[in-house]
Image (cartoon, rainbow, N blue to C red):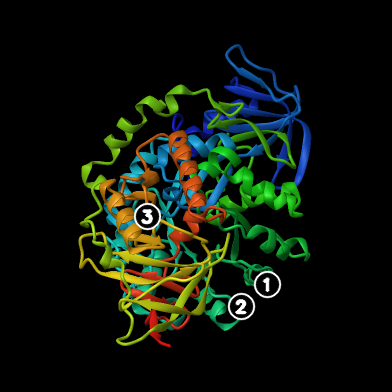
Amino acid sequence: MTEYLDTDAHGSLQETSKTLVAVARGDREPDVIIRNGDLVNVHTGEVMPGTDLVISEGRIVRMTDTGAVEAGESTEVIDADGQFLSPGFLDTHVHYESSMVTATGFCRGALPTGTTGAFMDPHEIGNVLGLDGIRLLLDEAADLPLKTFCTIPSCVPAAPGFEDAGAVIGSADIEEALEWDDVIALGEMMNYPGVVSGDEEVHDKLAATYETNKRATGHFASRETGAELDAFIAAGISSCHESIRKEEALARLRRGMWTMLRQGSAWKDIPETIKAVTETDVDTRHLLLVSDDTHPDTITEKGHLDRVLRVAISNGLDPVTAIQAVTLNAAEYYGVDADLGALSPGKMADVVFLDDLATVDVSRVMVDGSMVVEDGEWVDEGALPSESEHTAAVHEVFPEWARDTVKLDPQPADAFEIPAPEGASEVSAEVVRVHENQVVTSRESATLPVEDGAVALDGDISKAAVLERHGGDESVGRGFVTGFGFERGAVASTVAHDSHNLLVVGTSDEAMARAAERTIELDGGMVAVDDDGVLAEVPLPIAGLMSDLPLSEVSERVHNLEDAWEALGCDLDSPFMTMSLLALAVLPELRITNRGVVDTVGFDFIEPVGAD
């Protein structure tokens, strides 16, 4: 289904087609001409040197040899001076909330790196505030130069029966939201066992999606590449971003699935998954490159999709092929290729100026025919609120009820105890092992000592607790985790995918209680403590997920938090993003939710300890 979009200033193609044709005929002067660029032609997979782009009404009218079209008296002429001209980059799977800022902050950071459009799955705020929260985020995004499309969350909560979120989005809610103008698809279907087993509610959501001629996006976290994968795709689900091995990515491509290769702050899959293309001769028309979850300091220091492209190219992908994966392929997948995804007549003039193709060195960014960024700096001052106005602007969008979501009292230290079986001197514990830069965990066993009737810690094993924080039953799940390297203290976070309860990891009950208490006082956020008090904190008052501060300030606080984690003994890359998935009960192999320890392979609860 083709979607026709409005440019902010000029309207849709059907409203401007006569003007565009008049300019193309030469009967009307263009608004803008970009001279002397090397055009990255994603239609043909070639670079066309010495090319001009003629622009009117925010759209490209002609692509010609340099100098072929004369400028009018009021035409703005921009000299590309041999720079590469690329279509604006499109992120086909991203969660704005993971950047710890709202849509305004995300736009401020991502657009200067060449990202001009994003297909956002707002299931993080959806799990806390439901459709009302999603609507707030979309309304904010509607007034920004970054084009935001919504894939409406399909799994809120992600694992019903295994966790408790702040909201439930059922099939009737999805039917309602699919009618919103800014909803373009169904968000990632994480309940892949429900798809494969024929769960009625899951298939009702899929049916509602297909009834509106929209796509259903996927999340097939199983490592299986046979019957279950076929069943998942046979249900109509057309994309997946969960490949972590070459074989998984290749299996999806061969089945016609739009295969999203992910490179986030912590989930660094592309060096392995890109081999599905670079070590074979398969066609790349269904290849997509995505960021998924990206922290603020990653965006401010390393970039957004430009960073993802650099990783793909440095691992052997042809630069033009890589750009196709975030432009034309992306637009075709979501049916917006009538307007986006290429620099050709009729398309919106979203243009990224690159000094170098292989390093994706972004110099300037144009949106709808207007230059908004030069040398990494915003030149359109009216496009976003200033940094001094940022917090007030965010509060106008997100009212107090969206900033008061931690419905939990501070807990005593003994709330974090894990009792041992009566009379036991040591126990056999089920332990979750985290892996650096991977979404998966593994299940291990360890023998732990018992002190005063409670399980004590030993070696590189910490205690983890998930406290229901949405005003429900105040349940607490407790277990053990290893791989972080903590030597002392504790960390806490209300970013705990996907239900976003209060997650605490620590080396002592007292430290865990102290970290939890401070996080509650902040109305949500991330905190690191030691015996002397708080080492660092990142307040996230918007749904307990996002800051009301400017991106630069949030990035600095995240840096301080990283330093605090390191001081506690953890040297993992993006460790608190790894921690945030400890509660996500739709990823293998072992997770901890507010209801307990979950075996996500067998989908059952297990006891964290037993008599040794």
Measuring from the top left, give residue 166's x and y in whole percent: 27, 60
Using residue 150 as the reference point, say whether residue 43 is left or right of it: right
Depth check, front residue: 359 or 205: 359
Taking the spot 42% from the left edge, 35% from the top edge, the residue there is 144
Measuring from the top left, give residue 81's x and y in whole percent: 74, 24
Q: Residue furthest top?
A: 73
Query: On the image, numbered disc 3 is attached to which residue?
Result: 493
Taking the spot 52% from the left edge, 55% from the top edge, the residue there is 569
Measuring from the top left, give residue 51's x and y in whole percent: 74, 30
- Circle 3 — which element? strand
2 vs 3, front mark? 3
Depth check, front residue: 57 or 171: 171
Using residue 177 as the reference point, say whether residue 72 is left or right of it: right
Q: Quadrant of residue 169?
A: bottom left
Marks 2 & 3, CB-CB < 8 Å contact: no
- Circle 1 — which element? helix
Depth check, front residue: 312 or 256: 312
Query: On the image, numbered disc 2 is attached to which residue?
Result: 225
Marks 3 & 1, CB-CB < 8 Å contact: no
Query: On the image, numbered disc 1 is attached to which residue?
Result: 247
Spatial distance from mark 2 to mark 3, Cα to Cα?
A: 35 Å
Marks 1 & 2, CB-CB < 8 Å contact: yes
Please name the amino acid that badge 3 sits on.
Ser
Image quarter in which the C terminus is found: bottom left
Q: Residues within 10 Å of mark 3 (few under 14, many from 20)?
A: many
Q: Quadrant of residue 497?
A: bottom left
Please name the amino acid that badge 1 sits on.
Glu
